[in-house]
């Protein structure tokens, strides 16, 4: 009986060890010459995501030896943080919330993960913008469901250390297996304007929610709604990416581009060329993935406004 009990304890301990290791933070130690921009390029995420994960303001300066949390790449969060508007009444009114008091060492990234939320959702229900820096004692709304799960997990593993960090370098592999989940091929209204002409439109589901558009070799990718170019760069898992924000706050994400012809801060008019379609490293076909976000949440690209 004693031996059987010991085996059970061992199995539970191993399970908890691997569970907590799975959610361990990835950290990076700042080296001489590093900037937030160079680090963000190294890990193929946005500077805004890096700032938010480490509760840094736009005026904060990083120092050699400083440890930074490298957040998971999440294009919805990247879109929300690239936007000049992130708050949304619709999100706030449809989520049951509870109160969370910010403690020393907390970041929006850490609080969101602890409560089973995305950073975009956390910012939306608290009406925070992309430059938000939280302070100790500040009260935030968090998902009631996520907080309950986090509390239960904490209670069941009190003896396990959960604040470990792992210093590592993420290997960005553009030839990784295709993790996209494909839905049906869409027959869109012939009058619907798309970034490329007469594409085969395939739904992309799961964490990546949008459409995949077939394209001709090096075909120009056109802006379908005027707005400000908020982000240009390589984003992990998506290749070259351009975010264009409309005046109503929608972010139009054009990803998998072969080349880019605009710069951050430019105003793109409808019909202007943003870049060219890229050769997908997995399918070996020319195509782009097109998504539209509102407050970090994907909306149906076929129904998104055009002009």
Image: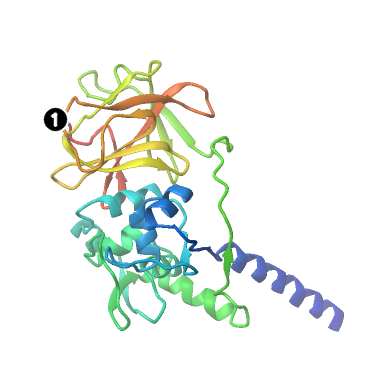
Q: Is residue 63 above or below residue 230?
A: below
Q: Nearer the viewer, residue 101 or 147?
A: 101
Q: Is residue 119 above or below residue 298?
A: below
In terms of secondary structure, where does tag 1 sit?
loop
Q: In x, y percent, where is residue 258?
A: 40, 27
Picture quadrant where residue 223 is located: top left
Residue 281 appears in the rendering: yes
Q: In x, y percent, where is residue 159?
A: 63, 82
How was this image coloured? rainbow
Toward the front, the furthest residue is: 32
Q: In x, y percent, where is residue 141?
A: 29, 72
Density class for disc 1 (Cα within 10 Å; few <14, some 14-19, many ≥20) is few
Residue at position x 28%, y 35% from top?
301
Quadrant in which the N terminus is drawn: bottom right
Q: Nearer the viewer, residue 252 or 93?
A: 252
Picture quadrant where residue 132 is located: bottom left
Q: In x, y percent, where is residue 227?
A: 17, 39
Residue at position x 34%, y 24% from top?
276
Residue 1 appears in the rendering: no
Q: Is residue 177 above or below residue 123?
A: above
Q: Nearer the viewer, residue 267 or 291?
A: 267
Residue at position x 35%, y 54% from top?
47
Instruction: Report the side of 167 relative to 140 (left or right).
Output: right
Q: How many marks?
A: 1
Instruction: Report the side of 209 relative to 25 (left or right).
Output: left
Quadrant in which the C terminus is drawn: top left
Query: Disc 1 designates what residue?
Result: 307
């Amino acid at each position: 009986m004693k031996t059987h009990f010991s085996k059970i304890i061992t199995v539970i301990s191993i399970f908890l060890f691997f569970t907590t290791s799975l959610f361990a933070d990835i950290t990076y130690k700042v080296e001489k010459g590093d900037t937030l921009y160079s680090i963000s390029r190294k890990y193929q995420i946005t500077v805004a995501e890096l700032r938010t994960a480490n509760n840094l303001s736009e005026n904060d300066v990083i120092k050699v030896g400083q440890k930074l949390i490298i957040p998971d790449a999440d294009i919805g969060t990247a879109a929300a943080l690239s936007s000049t508007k992130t708050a949304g009444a619709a999100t706030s009114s449809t989520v049951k919330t509870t109160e969370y008091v910010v403690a020393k060492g907390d970041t929006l990234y850490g609080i969101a993960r602890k409560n089973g939320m995305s950073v975009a959702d956390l910012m939306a229900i608290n009406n925070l913008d992309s430059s938000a820096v939280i302070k100790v004692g500040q009260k935030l709304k968090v998902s009631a469901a996520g907080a309950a799960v986090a509390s239960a997990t904490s209670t069941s593993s009190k003896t396990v250390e959960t604040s470990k960090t792992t210093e590592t370098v993420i290997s960005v592999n553009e030839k990784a297996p295709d993790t996209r989940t494909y839905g049906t091929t869409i027959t869109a209204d012939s009058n619907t304007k798309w970034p490329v002409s007469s594409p085969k439109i395939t739904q992309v589901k799961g964490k990546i929610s949008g459409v995949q558009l077939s394209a001709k070799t090096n075909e120009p990718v056109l802006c379908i709604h005027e707005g400000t170019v908020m982000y240009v760069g390589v984003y992990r898992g998506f290749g070259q990416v351009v975010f264009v924000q409309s005046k109503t706050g929608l972010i139009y994400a054009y990803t998998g581009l072969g080349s880019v012809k605009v710069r951050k801060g430019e105003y793109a008019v409808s019909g202007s060329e943003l870049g060219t379609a890229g050769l997908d490293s997995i399918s070996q076909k020319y195509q782009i993935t097109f998504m539209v976000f509102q407050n970090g949440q994907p909306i149906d690209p076929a129904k998104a406004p055009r002009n």
